[in-house]
Amino acid sequence: MQILLPDKLLVIVEIIDPNTFSGFNHLYPNDYPIFFTPNYHRFEQNSGFKTGFIHHDNKIFMPFRIYHKWVFNFMQIMYPPMCKGERLGHEEERVFLNKAVEVLKSEKKYHRIIQPYVWDVFYAYPDNAVSCPFGQLYSELDNKTMEDIFNEFSPKYRNAIRKVSSFQNAVSVRHNTQELQAFYEVYKDVHARQNVYYDTIQHFERMQQYLGKDNFLLTNLYFNDILEGGAIVSYTSKEANYLYGGAKNPTQQNGSIKLLQYEIIKFLKNKQVKKYIWGGCRLSDVTGTKQQGMQEFKLRFGAKVKKGYLWKLDINSTYCLIYDWMIATQQRLKGQKPVVDVIDYEKNREVIL
């Protein structure tokens, strides 16, 4: 969206109470992603985070949450700025972000803006930010029939889905059931085997509670009454986000998880959701990494790649230097390797996608 920004752009950084924030009167749920809704902010705040918006004139809004560690306050942007349900243009986004950084530096409350959520990419980044090229994988659902969408899947995926679907008496797809525990056991097992972080079941219980049946979708797929896998998706009419997934290894049927995603898309289509966001996408060569399998899985559903940027920025360089030294010392004492975030890993890599 191309909008005319005033020469003296007034930007407000505001921690909110989701029950009283007047800005929600201008953020119609059907026009915005989940991160702009009161229910999502209630979920984050009941998970222990402060949340808010950087906004201008009740027109432009950019949601964020706050991490607090020791004496350090870090901001994480949930989604790029939007105006009347649409993204800003490249130049407007750059101007808004620069003004937001200027205000944050003057208020001196926060020390660093860390890597944002990856549910959409930025068109621009503020001056002096560390950035990297990055992508979003998405499927358009609006103005398409399910046949149109199905035909965008790879031939291999279409055949696998047809084969599993032929076992009508064996396949059971359950939406929004009371089977969160069953999903969680599969999700936990996948992440434990890969030795990567996984959330507690209380995290998912809170999400289900605060997002509610109109914004939270849990789908499990069974074959012969045995759980093959499941997924959790958040959604508004604007778009849905594939948040979490888990599958048995191996599944009984090769096409089970492909059918699971097909059924999720069909559910979202019936809810008149316009777009399905599969997640972030590295644009560099991912051959031989676990990202390769994850990205190829989504691309074979006909997912498109939207290109843009991720970025981060130190607001108070002195505090950030002290924090980084403390973390490095802590890791060294524990014998841990330094953690490299996506931005630092990708910033100098060649874009090939």
Image: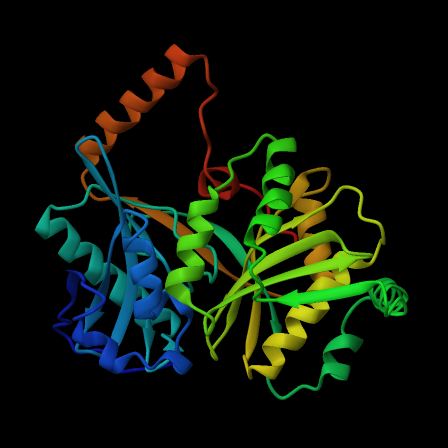
In which quadrant will I find the N terminus? bottom left
In the rendered image, residue 25, in percent from the top left (x then y), is placed at 23, 81
User: Is 176 positioned to the left or the right of 225 in the image?
Assistant: left
Is there any visible trace of residue 302 in the rendered image?
no
Count every numbered label the image shows and give the total: 0
Return the x and y of residue 348 as percentages of the image width and height. 51, 41
Query: Residue most toward the left?
Result: 107
* Most foreground residue, 200 or 139: 200
**Residue 113 drawn above or below residue 11:** above
Residue 312 appears in the picture as rendered: yes
Q: Compared with residue 149, is residue 315 higher up or lower down, i.e. above or below?
A: above
Q: Nearer the viewer, residue 24 or 83?
A: 24
Query: Which quadrant would residue 36 be assigned to in this image?
Result: bottom left
Say if 69 sits above or below 301 in the image: above
Residue 239, horizontal then vertical, whole percent: 50, 73
The residue nearer to you, when weighing 249 against 25, is: 249
> How is the structure coloured here?
rainbow
With 218 as the anchor, is 150 left or right in this view?
Answer: right
Q: x, y (%) of residue 294?
A: 67, 49
Identified at 17% across, 76% down, the residue is: 22
Q: Quadrant of the C terminus?
A: bottom right
Q: Is residue 320 above or below residue 175?
A: above
Quarter holding residue 335: top left
The residue drawn where x is 58% and y is 70% is: 276
Point 74% across, 52% down: residue: 228
